[in-house]
Amino acid sequence: MKNIPRLVITGTGSNVGKTIVSCAIIYGLQKKGYAIQPFKTGPDYIDAGYLSSVAGRQACNLDVWLMGKSGVLESLVRNSTSDISLIEGVMGFYDGIDGSKSLASTYQLCHITRTPAILVVDVGGVGRSVAATILGFIKFNKNTPIAGIILNRVGSERHKKICADAIKPLNIDVLGAIPKNITQLKSRHLGLIPVMESNKNNN
């Protein structure tokens, strides 16, 4: 596992921008000449479709509940044949099958695979309060693998600075910020609209 360059993209919840951030990172790394193998936490096939479309490689699902710890590790090792493996999380970072523990959560997946995580935070409508949210995620469980922050739906440069200044005392890096006026992926009750359907609607 130590020889597999890998990263998890997680979030504070659903619809905060995990998929668009994951796709953007895949695209950016490809532009630099890296081949990316995408993975999706849990059984979700819709998000995996977007990851596959951008990466040009079939995304693989990593589901602790269905596959068990050994199955997840085996699949990650077997399918990590590219330069970098990128794993998109599911729902919020600590969300699993119940409210008392983090079974089948992105948090558990990070610990099983020993993979650092980047936390995507939707800052639309908030300023300094974003620091309280991030602090909660960092402190909620010991030995958190959260290694950096990406801000989504940033309203302006001033808004970005307010959020960054609030986060600075937490000693965690803000790695990027996405403006709220850029293209966001469409969604409905099941989550994102499947990539094939989305492409059809745009034609």
Image (cartoon, rainbow, N blue to C red):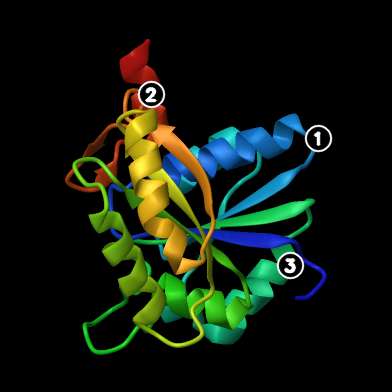
Q: Label 2 near label 1: C-beta < 8 Å?
A: no
Q: Residues within 10 Å of mark 1 (few under 14, many from 20)?
A: few
Q: Is residue 106 above or below residue 162?
A: below
Q: Label 1 near label 3: C-beta < 8 Å?
A: no
* Residue at left offset 32%, top offset 36%: 159
Q: Disc 3 to disc 1, how far (Cα)?
A: 22 Å
Q: Which of the two labelled residues, at mark 2 and mark 3, occupies the earlier sequence position?
A: 3
**Residue, disc 3:** 78
Q: Amino acid at mark 1?
A: Gly
Dot 3 lies on which element? Answer: helix
- All told, the count of numbered labels is 3
Q: Which mark is residue 182?
A: 2
Residue 3 location, quadrant: bottom right
**Residue, disc 1:** 33
Q: Quadrant of the C terminus?
A: top left
Q: Quadrant of the N terminus?
A: bottom right
Dot 2 lies on which element? Answer: loop
- Taking the image as shown, residue 76 lies to the left or right of residue 161, namely right
Dot 1 lies on which element? Answer: loop
Q: Please tell me whether mark 2 or mark 3 is closer to you in this view.
A: 2
Q: Position of residue 113 (x, y in %)?
A: 62, 77
Q: Position of residue 96 (x, y in %)?
A: 32, 76
